[in-house]
Image (cartoon, helix red, strand yellow):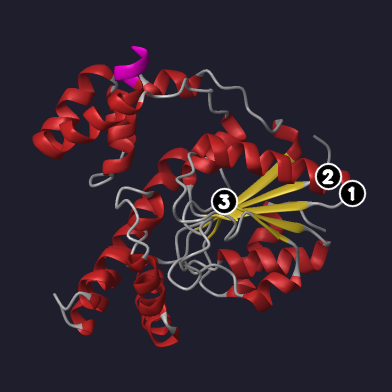
Amino acid sequence: MQGRIWLIAGPTASGKSALALKLAAETGAEIVGADSMQLYADLRLLTARPSEAEERQAPHHLFGTVDAACGWSTGRWLRAALEALEAIAARGRPAVVVGGTGLYFRALTQGLAEIPPIPPETRREAEAGFEHMGEAAFRTRLAEADPAAVARIAPGDRQRLVRAWEVFAATGEPLSDWQRTGEPPLPREAWAAVALEPPREILYARCDARLEIMVRQGALDEVAALMARKLDPTLPAMKAVGVREFAACLRGEVSLAEALDAAQRETRRYAKRQLTWMRGQMADWPRATAAEAAGQWEEARAALRLP
């Protein structure tokens, strides 16, 4: 694959999208999304997907292109991302891959093996096992088969815990071993990267303020429309931060203030998990630690080796 590829990672509300747009404006690049929730068309506001006006400033790929009824895996995103990058390179343009899903970046730069399809009954058994055992006992069982997975999967991440167990149950091989066997899709010389890591207290304040703005702009309407579809609650889009909290408000179980407070708390926890991933899995990536856009741009220019 030819062409210059820049990777921008960071937690929610860190300024990734603004930096990607600035980079695209300066270089003529096209933008590829690396966010497991911004993929879905149903939740533009709640997932902080670029606005229509922002999307008009530069070509965007893998933003809002998947229906919430579909559940994309990391492997499926990787295939779509590589197709987009190939097409961008064929047009003679650079690419910016931006998002907060660390596993997507790891798949892109380190590889992700093609895991055989998991039988539906195995998947159901894994889900039922988690429900029956609870997270602590489920982790203990998984640790015997795949200790590396247990070590890297954050507390409360039911989806990845169940995924790790179902892969082992179906194949007899730990998910961690499957992931280590993949070849890096992008050669190391093809990309440069930067991870945004603004001061945590500023990041958390931005998370809180942005959710308040989302509510004023109609985030509850998005959640109501999603609820009306009566989708499987285990689908990835149904697990987006804020869906569960605002759905409880719409059902009359909590007040809007209580739902907002809960969603803000979960968003801060999510940002913390993203930072933890970056520090563990992207330790060798250059950092941009400024809080404001101008400072981030200057740090990113140096990290990405821009003129």
* Residue 270, position as x, y percentages in the image: 34, 58
Amino acid at circle 2 = Ala
Question: Measured along the vertical axis of the image, is residue 78 above or below residue 227?
Answer: above
Main secondary structure found in the magenta portion: helix
Spatial CA span between label 3 and label 2:
18 Å
Q: For the residue carrying disc 3, how many other residues have a C-alpha within 10 Å: few (<14), some (14-19), or many (20+)?
A: many
The kind of residue tagged 3 is Ala
The residue lying at 45 percent from left, 20 percent from top is: 178
| Residue 92 badge | 1
Residue 213 visible:
yes
**Quadrant occupied by the C terminus:** bottom right
Where residue 296 appears, as percent x and y from the top left, is: 60, 67
Image: 189 above or below 271: above
Q: Mark 3 points at which residue?
A: 34
Q: Which residue lies furthest to the top in this view?
A: 172
- Residue 89 is tagged as 2
Separation (CA) of disc 3 from disc 1: 21 Å
Alpha carbon distance from label 2 to label 1: 5 Å
Q: Residue at (42%, 84%) from the top-left corner? A: 213
Kindly indicate whether the residue at mark 1 contacts the one at mark 2 (C-beta within 8 angstroms): yes
Q: Give the range drawn in magenta.
A: 168-172
The residue drawn where x is 57% and y is 42% is 77
130, 113: nearer the viewer = 130
Residue 98: in magenta span: no
